[in-house]
Amino acid sequence: GIIYDVIVEPPSVGSMTDEHGHQRPVAFLAYRVNGQYIMEGLASSFLFTMGGLGFIILDRSNAPNIPKLNRFLLLFIGFVSVLLSFFMARVFMRMKLP
Protein backbone atom coordinates (compact mmCIF):
# COMPACT_ATOMS: atom_id res chain seq x y z
CA GLY A 1 0.00 0.00 0.00
CA ILE A 2 1.20 3.42 1.02
CA ILE A 3 4.55 2.23 2.40
CA TYR A 4 5.29 0.53 -0.93
CA ASP A 5 4.38 3.72 -2.81
CA VAL A 6 6.64 5.86 -0.61
CA ILE A 7 9.65 3.54 -0.88
CA VAL A 8 9.46 2.48 -4.54
CA GLU A 9 7.77 5.64 -5.95
CA PRO A 10 5.93 3.91 -8.83
CA PRO A 11 4.17 5.93 -11.55
CA SER A 12 0.45 6.55 -11.20
CA VAL A 13 -0.34 4.69 -14.44
CA GLY A 14 1.76 2.87 -17.00
CA SER A 15 1.68 2.77 -20.78
CA MET A 16 1.53 0.00 -23.34
CA THR A 17 2.07 0.03 -27.09
CA ASP A 18 -0.87 -1.35 -29.07
CA GLU A 19 -0.71 -3.10 -32.46
CA HIS A 20 -0.79 0.24 -34.33
CA GLY A 21 2.18 1.64 -32.41
CA HIS A 22 0.16 4.06 -30.27
CA GLN A 23 0.84 4.45 -26.56
CA ARG A 24 -2.13 3.39 -24.45
CA PRO A 25 -2.44 3.99 -20.68
CA VAL A 26 -2.81 0.93 -18.43
CA ALA A 27 -3.76 0.90 -14.75
CA PHE A 28 -2.52 -2.61 -13.89
CA LEU A 29 1.09 -3.75 -13.91
CA ALA A 30 0.70 -7.11 -15.63
CA TYR A 31 2.78 -10.23 -14.84
CA ARG A 32 4.11 -8.82 -11.54
CA VAL A 33 2.23 -9.73 -8.38
CA ASN A 34 4.65 -7.83 -6.13
CA GLY A 35 4.58 -4.60 -8.19
CA GLN A 36 1.83 -2.05 -8.72
CA TYR A 37 0.93 1.34 -10.10
CA ILE A 38 -0.55 3.90 -7.72
CA MET A 39 -4.02 3.75 -9.33
CA GLU A 40 -4.02 -0.03 -9.01
CA GLY A 41 -3.21 0.20 -5.32
CA LEU A 42 -5.94 2.78 -4.73
CA ALA A 43 -8.53 0.65 -6.54
CA SER A 44 -7.54 -2.47 -4.61
CA SER A 45 -7.61 -0.68 -1.27
CA PHE A 46 -11.08 0.66 -2.09
CA LEU A 47 -12.27 -2.89 -2.77
CA PHE A 48 -10.84 -4.23 0.49
CA THR A 49 -12.41 -1.32 2.39
CA MET A 50 -15.76 -1.98 0.73
CA GLY A 51 -15.59 -5.65 1.72
CA GLY A 52 -14.73 -4.78 5.31
CA LEU A 53 -17.59 -2.29 5.50
CA GLY A 54 -19.87 -4.99 4.14
CA PHE A 55 -18.94 -7.24 7.05
CA ILE A 56 -19.54 -4.37 9.49
CA ILE A 57 -22.97 -3.75 7.94
CA LEU A 58 -23.78 -7.46 8.24
CA ASP A 59 -22.82 -7.32 11.90
CA ARG A 60 -24.99 -4.23 12.51
CA SER A 61 -28.00 -5.97 10.96
CA ASN A 62 -28.21 -8.25 14.02
CA ALA A 63 -29.16 -5.44 16.41
CA PRO A 64 -32.40 -6.25 18.30
CA ASN A 65 -34.31 -2.99 17.68
CA ILE A 66 -34.08 -2.83 13.87
CA PRO A 67 -37.36 -3.04 11.91
CA LYS A 68 -37.73 -5.92 9.48
CA LEU A 69 -37.40 -3.81 6.30
CA ASN A 70 -34.26 -2.08 7.57
CA ARG A 71 -32.78 -5.44 8.58
CA PHE A 72 -33.46 -6.80 5.10
CA LEU A 73 -31.86 -3.73 3.48
CA LEU A 74 -28.79 -3.96 5.72
CA LEU A 75 -28.40 -7.67 4.96
CA PHE A 76 -28.78 -7.03 1.23
CA ILE A 77 -26.28 -4.14 1.16
CA GLY A 78 -23.81 -6.08 3.31
CA PHE A 79 -23.93 -9.22 1.15
CA VAL A 80 -23.68 -7.21 -2.07
CA SER A 81 -20.67 -5.28 -0.75
CA VAL A 82 -18.83 -8.41 0.35
CA LEU A 83 -19.57 -10.38 -2.81
CA LEU A 84 -18.82 -7.47 -5.14
CA SER A 85 -15.48 -6.76 -3.50
CA PHE A 86 -14.54 -10.46 -3.56
CA PHE A 87 -15.34 -10.98 -7.23
CA MET A 88 -13.81 -7.66 -8.31
CA ALA A 89 -10.58 -8.58 -6.50
CA ARG A 90 -10.60 -11.83 -8.50
CA VAL A 91 -11.08 -9.83 -11.71
CA PHE A 92 -8.16 -7.58 -10.74
CA MET A 93 -5.93 -10.61 -10.18
CA ARG A 94 -7.01 -12.08 -13.51
CA MET A 95 -6.06 -8.78 -15.18
CA LYS A 96 -2.73 -8.85 -13.35
CA LEU A 97 -1.91 -12.46 -14.23
CA PRO A 98 -3.47 -13.11 -17.67
Image (cartoon, rainbow, N blue to C red):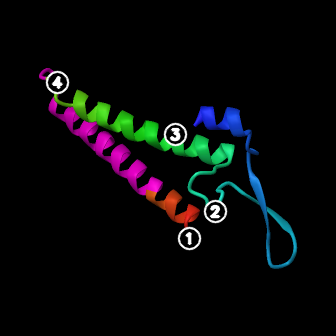
Quarter the N terminus occupies: top right
Kind of residue at disc 2:
Ala
Q: Is residue 53 above or below residue 96?
A: above
On whether residue 62 falls in the magenta region, the answer is: no
On the image, the x and y values in percent for residue 32 come to: 61, 59
**Alpha carbon distance from label 2 to label 1:** 8 Å
Earlier along the polypeptide chain: callout 1 or callout 4? 4
Q: Which mark is residue 20?
A: none
Kind of residue at disc 1:
Pro
Residue, disc 4: 63
Which span is picked out in magenta? 64-89
Earlier along the polypeptide chain: callout 2 or callout 1? 2
> 72 or 45: nearer the eye?
45
Residue, disc 3: 46
Earlier along the polypeptide chain: callout 1 or callout 3? 3
Whether residues under marks 2 and 1 lie with C-beta atoms below 8 angstroms apart, the answer is: yes
| SS for dot 4 | loop
At 52% from the left edge and 57% from the top edge, which residue is drawn? 92
Whether residues under marks 1 and 3 lie with C-beta atoms below 8 angstroms apart, the answer is: no
On the image, the x and y values in percent for residue 76 come to: 28, 43
On whether residue 67 falls in the magenta region, the answer is: yes
